[in-house]
Image: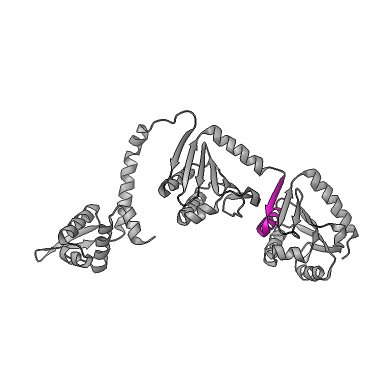
Amino acid sequence: MGKEKVLQEFGLTNAEVKVYINLLEFGESTASEVSKRTGKNRTFTYDRLKKLSDFGLVSFIIKDYKKYFIAANPSQLLSILKEREERIQGILPELKKLKRPLILGPKVEVYSSSKGVKTALNLMLNSKDTIYLHGTLKCFQRKMPTHFRIWNQRRIKKKIHMRILSSENVTLTLAKSGLLSEEEKDVTSNFTFGSFTLLIMWGDYPVAVLIRSKEIAENNRAFFYTIWDREVKIYSGSKGIQKAFIELLEETKEFIGFGYSKDLSDVYTVEFSNGWHMERIKKKISCRIVAVEDKLTREYFKSRIKGKTKFSVRYLDQIIQGPACISLSDNMVVTFLYTEKKLRAILNRNKEAVAVYKKYFDQLWKQAKK
């Protein structure tokens, strides 16, 4: 945002901004000199100088019976803001007494301007309550990049945690995220915090609907956890496959899998694999996989296994292993569908399913060759 626009938001008119910047550039000047440089008549310019003087942004001195105007140091803007803040702090108790108590039952407020939406978003930072988001975060980042950065920094500073359910691959400090399938993609943002629900529609002109209701907020959280805690989840695309691999390293002592091939490595990429193995080794997680018996796959894993601790690979015919890659942690089994047009990772936290696949892996491991 340009300096002229920021100064206008500070409370100056366009003409006052031009006069102030002109004085900053040229130093002490008479009203006539400023008038000539800005292309405005002397009376108009003098009125603007008086307004700036009232603001505390312009002062004057008398030399040779002439009045010379001087622009205040730009840091004076911060002093003025501080003074305004102190004045507002002084009347806050009185204003709070005037505010009527919340009416029982849901209360709905609609914010239909950019500033209004920002005001609604900032309400989430007034308490330590965990923020639950179901829907898009990328639209917030894209539509209001500067405000998102400031908002997120304030959230982190206040140590406010987030839980996010989105079809977008989101990574934020103090936030846990669950990836939804492309079929569950949403272009709205549904925030729940404390007794509030905030729904934002990100169109050309964003609109926010704030609902103040403890009952509705609790229902939203219950629905959120219904999705969050479900035993089966589906992630889509290469990013979804990468996210599933990362989740397999959570709270496990061993990583096992079968159906691995060079083709699958092309999907998750060598760069990702390097970072994944670094995290695995850091967590002291052992890794055993059964890969497809073919030349390209053998050559690939021969180079990949070098220098990596607790990493063993054996080989077996693909017909025996099946058409997909199956990977397991201590509490989850993931089916990677990578040979079809649409890439999918199907996560299953059912204990019986995990136990059955572990037994099957043990049988394959015994049959597989080094």
Q: Is residue 248 visible?
A: no
As for residue 245 lying within the magenta part, the answer is: yes
Place of residue 186 in the rendered image (x, y in percent of width and height, measured from the top left): 58, 48
Which quadrant: the C terminus?
bottom right
Place of residue 182 in the rendered image (x, y in percent of width and height, measured from the top left): 64, 52
Place of residue 72 in the rendered image (x, y in percent of width and height, measured from the top left): 25, 60
Place of residue 125 in the rendered image (x, y in percent of width and height, measured from the top left): 48, 45
> Please, which colouring scheme is shown?
one colour
Q: Is residue 95 above or below residue 167?
A: above
Horizontal placement of 17 versus 200: left or right?
Answer: left
Residue positioned 51% across, 43% down in the render: 199
Q: Nearer the viewer, residue 341 or 349?
A: 341
Horizontal placement of 326 versus 70: left or right?
Answer: right
Q: Nearer the viewer, residue 100 or 324?
A: 324
- Considering every residue shown, the one lying at the far left of the view is 65
Residue positioned 65% across, 42% down in the render: 227
Horizontal placement of 215 versus 64: left or right?
Answer: right
Point out the stretch of residues depicted in magenta. 232-251
Residue positioned 68% across, 52% down in the render: 235
Residue positioned 24% across, 53% down in the render: 55
Horizontal placement of 54 versus 369: left or right?
Answer: left
Which quadrant: the N terminus?
bottom left
Total numbered circles: 0
Q: Is residue 156 above or below residue 101?
A: below
Q: Nearer the viewer, residue 79 or 365?
A: 365
- Considering every residue shown, the one lying at the far top of the view is 104
As for residue 80 lying within the magenta part, the answer is: no
